[in-house]
Image: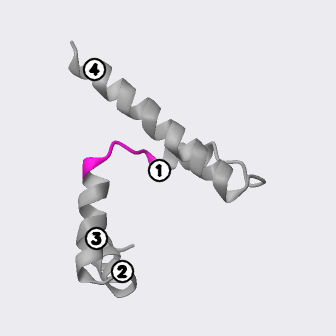
Amino acid sequence: MITDTEIKLKGVQILAKHLGDVEAERFIALIQREPFDYTNWRQGLDEDLTIEAISQKAMELRRQSAEQGASGDAT
């Protein structure tokens, strides 16, 4: 088993290799900013959906997460 630090290092290396340094940094910043639970979204994903339908489901989950976060800020 590899350490958390090794996983993070490999992840950044893969991102940089495929996106380039600048876009890899942008990706990391986007992930840190947005309240998106990939695991939760992935569990509800239907394998028979079109890419457009998958995108719609992801956007709906993101909207719901944003609404939940906003309602928590109001208290």
- Residue at label 4? 72
Q: Residue at x 29, y 57 (%)?
A: 30
Q: Position of residue 62 (x, y in %)?
A: 44, 40
Q: CA distance from mark 2 to mark 3?
A: 16 Å
- Determine whether the residue tagged by mark 2 lies in a helix, strand or loop: helix
Q: Earlier in the sequence, mark 2 or mark 4?
A: 2
| Label drawn at residue 28 | none
The amino acid type, in three-letter code, at marker 3 is Lys
Q: Residues within 10 Å of mark 2 (few under 14, many from 20)?
A: some
The amino acid type, in three-letter code, at marker 2 is Leu
Viewer-side residue, 69 vs 13: 69
The reply to whether residue 5 is in sight is: no
Q: CA distance from mark 3 to mark 1?
A: 17 Å
Q: Residue at x 43, y 45 (%)?
A: 37
Residue furthest to the right in view is: 48
Main SS, magenta residues: loop
- Mark 1, mark 2: which one is toward the viewer? 2
- Mark 2, mark 4: which one is toward the viewer? 2
- Residue at label 1? 38
- Residue at label 3? 8
Is 29 on the left-hand or right-hand side of 14?
left
- Residue at label 2? 19
Which residues fall within the magenta stretch? 33-37
Q: Position of residue 45 (x, y in %)?
A: 65, 48
